[in-house]
Image (spheres, grey):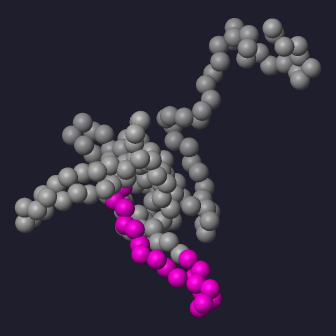
Amino acid sequence: MANETIITVVGNAVADPELRYAQNGKPVANFTIASTPRAFDRQSNEWKDGDALFLRCSVWGDPAEHVGQSITKGTRVIAQGRLKQRAYQDREGQNRTAIELEVDEIGPSLRYATAQVTRSGGGGSGQRQAPADEPWITPGSSDSETPF
């Protein structure tokens, strides 16, 4: 993870994500986010759109299936991940470079919408069951004495 460029992008899904499965059965969702900066023009007293950034994104594993079920064309999303550079040759044989976002986290933007979250069975509630004999986990009152 060192020396990787991590960015956060807010924008709209250009189309429904394409959900596919690799030969090993691992799911991958590919989609494009369009992010358009806006600035207030004081002379005209109105908002002006800047040039749109179209960023191709991919997400792997269980989150790919979640994206496939949750994100649709036009959904405003917040995505965070690592920029990756990919070299390829186009149809004319010219060398090209593409910059893509390998998504680590993604969700709907709640600025102009609401969402209802349904937790999936796997992964992370962030809580795990503590062993019964673990003294540091034993609940106490705020008046409890520090154990050292």
Return the x and y of residue 21 as percentages of the image width and height: 27, 45
The reply, left or right, for residue 128 in relation to residue 89 is right
Whether residue 30 is visible, yes or no, is: no
Q: Is residue 46 magenta?
A: yes
Residue 137 visible in the current orientation: yes
Residue drawn where x is 41% and y is 47% of the image: 5
Where are the magenta residues, as a range? 39-57
Task: Tell which of 87 and 42 is nearer to you.
Answer: 42
Residue 83: image location, x then y, percent: 37, 50
Tell me what residue is drawn at x 88 percent, y 13 percent.
Answer: 145
For the N terminus, the image quarter is top left
Task: Report the front residue among 3 and 79.
Answer: 3
Q: Main secondary structure of the magenta part?
A: strand
Does 134 appear above or below 80? above
Q: Position of residue 54 (x, y in %)?
A: 37, 66
> From the viewer's perspective, is 13 left or right of 90?
right
Q: Residue at x 32, y 49 (%)?
A: 84
Q: Is residue 21 left or right of residue 49?
A: left
